[in-house]
Image (cartoon, rainbow, N blue to C red):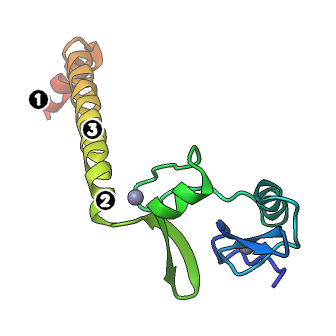
Amino acid sequence: MTTWDPKLVHLVDGIIPAGGRFRAACTCGHRTTRRANENLAVAALRAEHGTPPSTCSLCGRDFAHLTWVQIKSVLVIHDVDGRQFLACRGMPDECTRLYLPRQAALDAAAELAAAELAAFVAARRAESPVRRRLRMIRGEG
Ligand SMILES: [Zn+2]
Ligand SMILES: [Zn+2]
């Protein structure tokens, strides 16, 4: 119960009241010992199992600014061959809505950069004496 498995997602899963005190449960199944209040229980769990990135594996959206309760509502743990990863609830549709505009912007930037590079190369060729000399030689051959 106390081992930390790197293949699993370790997010706060819930708070369990225990005799006037509180345990925090990790999504991997680990539970802390009893603490005086919920915040101390969560802090204890993070000390034991770390604070993993609250990021969607698909679209890269980061939910670290949310509370653990909110994170539970927006991110879902998916299991692929025993390895867990986090993704938006409603993925992949929820992700593509955000991911595609970003990808389109990247594509446009890449096209612009390529066009600028091509224009730059063309301009340098036009004014390059080396090119003229090369053309002369090619013309003679
Ligand atoms: Zn854990
Ligand atoms: Zn996502």
Q: Are marks 2 and 1 in contact (CB under 8 Å)?
A: no
Q: Please tell me in which quadrant of the rendered image residue 40 appears.
A: bottom right
Q: Position of residue 141 (x, y in %)?
A: 14, 35
Judge the density around disc 3: few (<14), some (14-19), many (≥20) Cα neighbours within 10 Å.
few
List the residue tagged with mark 3.
105
Q: Please tell me in which quadrant of the rendered image residue 47 appears.
A: bottom right
Q: Quadrant of ligand 1?
A: bottom right
Q: Which of disc 2 and disc 3 is earlier in sequence? A: 2
Q: Nearer the viewer, residue 23 or 102?
A: 23
Please state if 23 lies on the left or on the right of 26 as rendered.
right
Judge the density around disc 2: few (<14), some (14-19), many (≥20) Cα neighbours within 10 Å.
some
Residue at 65%, 76% (x, y): give it.
8
Kindly identify the amino acid type of the residue bearing the numbered disc 1.
Answer: Gly
Mark 2 CB lies closer than 8 A to ligand 2: yes
Q: Which of disc 1 and disc 2 is earlier in sequence? A: 2
Q: Position of residue 5 (x, y in %)?
A: 74, 78
Please state if 125 lies on the left or on the right of 19 as rendered.
left
Badge 3 marks a residue whose secondary structure is: helix
Kindly identify the amino acid type of the residue bearing the numbered disc 3.
Answer: Ala
Q: Position of residue 53 (x, y in %)?
A: 62, 56
Say if 25 sits above or below 100 in the image.
Answer: below
Task: Measure the alpha-carbon separation of dots 2 and 1.
Answer: 60 Å
Q: Which mark is residue 94?
A: 2
List the residue tagged with mark 1.
139
Residue at 53%, 58% (x, y): give it.
71
Task: Measure the alpha-carbon separation of dots 3 and 2.
Answer: 18 Å
Task: Measure the alpha-carbon separation of dots 3 and 1.
Answer: 44 Å
Q: Position of residue 112 (x, y in %)?
A: 23, 30
Badge 1 marks a residue whose secondary structure is: helix
